[in-house]
Amino acid sequence: MKDSGDLARPEVPVMPETAGSLPQQQIEREIKLDVGDDFVLPGLVGTDGVALVDEPVTHELAATYFDTLDLRLLSRSVTLRRRTGGTDAGWHLKLPEAPGVRTELSAPIGPGEAADPPEQLLQLVRGLVRRRALRPVLLLQTRRQVRVLRDAHGRPLAEVADDEVSAHPLQTGSQRCWREVEVELLDEASPDLLEGVAARLLAAGATRAAPGSKASRALGDALPVPPGGPSGARAEDGPRAGDVVRGHLADLLEELMRLDPRVRLDAPDAVHRMRVATRRLRSVLASFADLLTPEVVPRLRAELAWLATMLGAARDAEVLRERLVALVQAEPPELVRGPVRERIEALLGERYRLAHAEVVSTLDGPRYLDLLDALAWLCRQPVEGPPWTPRAVRPAPGELARAMRSTWRRVRRLAEAAERAGQDERAGGDEAGGGDTAQVEAALHEVRKAAKRARYAAESLVEVFGAPSRRFAARMTRIQDTLGANQDSVVTRAVLAELAELAERAGEPTFTYGRLHALEQRRGAHTAAAFTRQLARASRASATDWMR
């Protein structure tokens, strides 16, 4: 996507190349509480297994936070800092996972690295930062008193940090000072301990702190709200079509960028979720293409298809490995002949590792960054003008229902084509039936993709149409899942044939691969009847009246 049209030219990147090992990683679970200057820490012995509280240890901490001028990291609760003092001095990157839960990655401060973040952490935020320069935006100075809570065996359970904080914004805002108490779990202690300790502190006069890091609190109103959600602009009879679609696109883009560092870290299910976000973006652009000028949608959808394909290679290897291992484990031991599981793990494990490395390389490349820039640009454009068409300012219910009808008709049209393909195969005397031929399988795969698009479109319209849209999306999900099981069976059978050929060349038994292939063939054949029933339910007037 080199040709960015009227996109603003990005800033020249400032991304230092810094040597170093992979960052250390841990999950941080904590609760923050606000306390006054006269707050006295209560006794905590007896709280959920706490038998001993260490004497306090005082640390003087200084942390410099790095971000772009428009605060792309901190506005999304991502913190990148360089801290001195205490027991964990160094570079820290924290990624939010859930309220009170963050993934923390750390790297040491090496020679000559005093000013710039290390490359191994910069890579993890590249999808958010892209070509923007990182610079110091905030200095936090903290006087910290730390008490370790231990169980009866002396094992550490949690740390209670009593912090006196002085915050100095370096770009905008004024100095702030406050006192807070952090309770952080250690060594996989029970999360119940956090609430137990918090209850003691609340009873002693503490109050729950607002969500967010110290940095977000220090910047306050200077911290921008990331884009997403529907625009506040309204037509007289409700939201405008373009505002609804633009808000949904912005939410999906935020999800894509949130998953970027997790994919790089190979976090569980991250590749799958990023591919889903990519496909949702592509589907929404297709379903509501009439709201945008013709030159915008094909280009963005082509680039999103490219990204989904890159992610798909890794995801497919991961899913196939899990699926085949589960099939082998479900077999009676006497029917598993030869090193079947080992061969599955070897082939698909290596295939996943290579595909994931290719994904990471893709996420570092200019084509991916250009795509993110183009999507972000689109989500910033007011719907009153290009690249939005006049349809975008029309009331959402009528305009989006019209688009939804077109998306649903596509599902029906492709389903009819699949039925004709099945009839042709049966008329030709194919004993396997309509669900087990390449022609019918390809037709059903197209239906599945269309049902997925319809599902994503309906889900994006729940804020406008409510329960009817949600129920229709659920019906499309069932069709997608049923036909997905059929497609999974098709792909699995192809891999089983490949594994059998490799085993035969190595002089190993191939019986188990043939057995699993036959079982998969039978499973695939059973999906046709379920699909027919589900399509009939989705076609009822009660399911589609909301589109009229």
Image (cartoon, grey):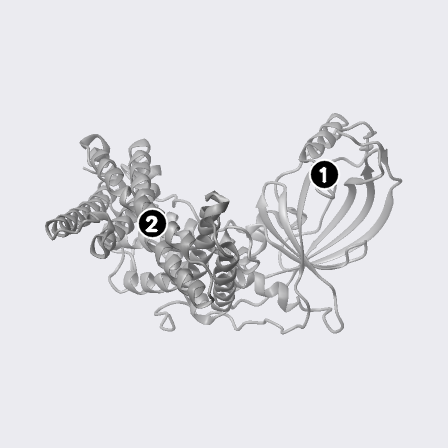
Q: Position of residue 39 (x, y in %)?
A: 80, 33
Q: In 3D space, how far apart are the residues under numbered discs 2 and 1 (Cα atoms)? A: 47 Å
Look at label 2 and name its amino acid: Ala
Q: Front-most of 358 and 401? A: 358
Q: Position of residue 431 (x, y in %)?
A: 18, 49
Which residue lies at the image location 30% right of the left edge and 53% below the top edge? 384
154 lies above or below 542: below
Q: Front-most of 439 and 11? A: 439
**Residue at numbered disc 2:** 518
176 left or right, relative to 132: right
Name which quarter of the figure residue 538 lies in. top left
User: Which quadrant would the C terminus be assigned to in this image?
Assistant: top left
Look at label 1 and name its amino acid: Ala
Q: Position of residue 257 (x, y in %)?
A: 49, 56
**Residue at numbered disc 1:** 189
| Neighbourhood count class around disc 2 (C-alpha, 10 Å): few under 14, some 14–19, many 20 upward | few
Q: Position of residue 451 (x, y in %)?
A: 27, 46
354 lies above or below 163: below
117 left or right, relative to 539: right
507 lies above or below 414: below
